[in-house]
Amino acid sequence: MNVRRRAALTLGLLVAVATAACTPPEPELAGEHVDVVGLWSGPELDAFATVASTWEDDTDAVVDWQGSRDIARDLAARLAADDPPDLAVLPNPGLLHDLVDDGVLVPPEADQFDEDYSPAWIDLGSDDGELYGVFAKVSSKATVWYSPGTFAAGGYDVPATWDALTTLADQMVATGVSPFSVVAPRGPGSGWALTDWIAQLVLGTCGPEPYDRWVAAETPWTDACVRGAFDRFTALVTTPGYVLGGTEAILTTSDADGVLPLYTDPPTAQLYSMASFAQGFITSAYPELVPGEGYDWFPFPAVDPVHAGATTVGGDVVVMMTDTPAARSFLAFLAGADAQTAWVELGGYTSANRNVPLDSYADAVARSIAEQLTQAAVTRFGAGDLMPAEVQRAWWAGMLELVEDPSTLDALLASQTQLAAEAR
C-alpha cells in the first residue's frame, strides 16, 4: 500500500506531525520509491504512515509499504526471486544476525546515529561490531506494574532487589493478599511471557557477558547461574499463596487480563511483571486512573545488586537491504529525533532515541519508561528473540510444562542445551 494514500486516512494524526521539524528538501529524490516490508498493522501502521508522510512531502518521494504476517518467510521469498525490499522492519535482532550471515544487509553510515542513540542501542543493532539496524520502536521487559495507592495503604516499600521482592511477597501473603499475577498468554507462542521472567533473571543475576554466552549457546542451560534463574522462578510460582489463581490462572489468563487484578476494588493481586506495553492494557481497562498515581511501575529487581538497572528489551529494528539514496534518506529520517518525536506524540510509542524530549510523552509513566530505555547502561534483547526459532519455540513449550510440573526442570535444561548446541 502507498503510505501517502494511507496517511490521508489519518488526518487527525497529521496535526501532530505538522508541528515537527522537517528534513531539508531533497529534490533529487523526487519520484523515487522506497519499498518497506514489516509486520505493523492497524494503529501502528497508521502512525508510521503519518510520520512517513512528512518525509514524502519533503522529498516528493513515495514510501510503499508491504505488510507481512511472517517476515522471515516473506523476505526469504523475495530474496529467492532476487527482489529484496529497500528496507525491512524486523521484530528482533536474531533475524538481523541471520540476514547478516546471509550477506543480504547493507550497513548504513553508523556515525550519523551516534548522537541520537546510546552505545547500548548501537550495540543491539550491530553484528560483529558493525551497525546494520536502527531501532524504530522499543519496549522495556524489565517493568513490574503496581498500584501506588495500594502500596501506601499496605505500608509496602518498592523492592530494589530480588530478596526484597520475596520478603515483600511474604509480607503480603501473611495478610491474606496474593502478591503476583503471572501469565503465559493464550494463543500463538504461549509461554513467551514466562521466558521473559527467565531472561531478566539471568541478566540480573549473571550479568551481560554470561547472558550473551548463554544466548549464543556457548554456556549450557545447566550452568549454575542460568539454572539459578529457573530455580528462582519455579520457587516463586510454586510458593503457596504467591500467585493469584495458581497454575490454572497462569496457563489460562491473557497478558491483557493479567494486569486487571491489581486495580480492582479491592485488588486481588499486587504485582505484575510484564513489558511496558502493559500500560495500554491498564489505560484501556481503567481510563480513570491517573498515570503515576493510580498506576505505576518499578524496575524488575536484580538478584545481584551489581547488575541493578540491567534491562531486557523488545523492539523493531529497521535494516537496509537495497542501497539507494532514497532508502538511506528514509532510514536516516525515521531514526532521527524529529521523526521519533512526532511518532511519540501520536501515542502508544516509546523511542530509544535519547534526543527525543521526555516532555513529548503524554504522561509521567510513559516518560519514565522512555528514560529507563534511553539511559540504561546495560541493555539486552529478550533472550528468546535472539535464539534460533526452534530453540525459542521449544523454550516456550517447556515453560508451560515447567509451570504444570516443576520436576521437569532438569529435562528442560538438558534438552534446551542440546537443541541450542545443534542450532548453532
Image (spheres, rainbow, N blue to C red):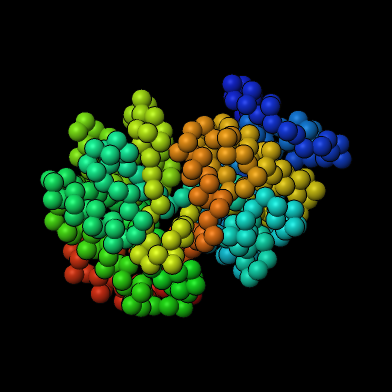
The residue lying toward the viewer, choosing from 8 and 295, is 295
> Residue 85: x percent and y percent?
67, 50
Kindly tell me whether residue 397 is visible in this rendering. Answer: no
Relative horizontal placement of residue 60, taking residue 169 as reference (left or right): right
Relative horizontal placement of residue 356, taking residue 201 as reference (left or right): right
Kindly tell me whether residue 121 is visible in this rendering. Answer: yes
Instruction: Residue at 36% x, 56% y: name it.
Output: 160
Instruction: Residue at 32% x, 67% y: name it.
Output: 229
Q: Measured along the vertical axis of the image, is residue 157 above or below residue 213?
A: above
> Residue 324: x percent and y percent?
78, 50
The residue lying toward the viewer, choosing from 168 and 310, is 168
Instruction: Residue at 76% x, 45% y: name it.
Output: 329
The quarter of the rendered structure image containing the N terminus is top right
> Residue 194: x percent and y percent?
32, 56
Task: Residue lying at the far front in this picture: please name it.
Answer: 155
> Residue 17: x percent and y percent?
65, 29
Q: How many marks?
A: 0
The residue lying toward the viewer, choosing from 372 and 80, is 372
The residue lying toward the viewer, choosing from 317 and 369, is 369
Q: Measured along the vertical axis of the image, is residue 223 above or below residue 387?
A: below
